[in-house]
Structure formats: structure tokens, C-alpha cells
Image: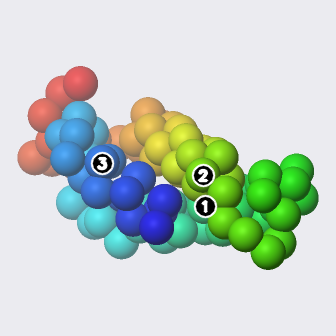
Amino acid sequence: MAAVVAFVIARIVPARRPRRWLWELLAALITTLILGVAATALDFGGWNEPDWRAGLFALAGALAVLGALRLVSRPSSGASPP
């Protein structure tokens, strides 16, 4: 769920938005998967119950990765300058 929220927020922001949205979605999914496992290892709620801190941790990480991807990528031909 955090990956979808991060992806939607990133797609709303027009600065350096790529035309191909699939890469952003994959980056958000992979990041939230990795950070979700890390949050479990850090014992944000443990294995048996979902915890809001783990979701927030994954969301913040996915937003950071999507922002970093936009910073290092070349702007597409129709993108507006930041």
C-alpha cells in the first residue's frame, strides 16, 4: 500500500516526471519491499501485527528513492523544468 501511495504522490508532482511510469512503480514496489523487511527486522510491530511505523518508514523511503531517481534522470522532452 505504501508503494502505491508513494507512486501516486510522485505522479502528481510534474517536475521531471518521466513519460514511462512503469519504472517509477517498480522502484516504489522494490523499495517498499526492502524497507518493509528492514522494518520487520528492526521490530516495528514484529511479524504478527502490522504497525503504522513500518508503513511510514516504507513510504518515506519510497518517496526518497523516487525523488532521487528524478534528480539523476534526464528530463523527458515534454517535461517542465523544476
Tell me if 37 is positioned left or right of 67 in this view. right
Please name the residue shown 21% across and 60% down the image.
19
**What's the residue at 45%, 38% (across, down)?**
67
SS at circle 3? helix
The three-letter amino acid code for the residue at tag 3 is Ile
Residue identifier under label 1: 32
- Which of these two is toward me, 71 or 52? 52
Quadrant assignment for the C terminus: top left
Q: Is residue 6 above or below residue 15?
A: below
Specify which label sits upstream in the sequence, 1 or 3.
3
Q: Nearer the viewer, mark 3 or mark 2?
A: 2
Say whether residue 4 is left or right of residue 26. Answer: left
Q: According to the image, label 2 marks what residue?
A: 52
Whether residue 69 is visible to the viewer of this picture, yes or no, is: no
* Image quadrant in which you'd find residue 51: bottom right
Name the residue beneath numbered marker 3: 9
Q: Amino acid at mark 2?
A: Trp
Secondary-structure class at tag 2:
helix
> Which residue is rendered at x = 82% and y = 72% of the image?
47
Of labels 3 and 2, earlier in sequence is 3
Per the image, label 1 sits on a secondary structure element best described as helix
Judge the density around disc 3: few (<14), some (14-19), many (≥20) Cα neighbours within 10 Å.
few
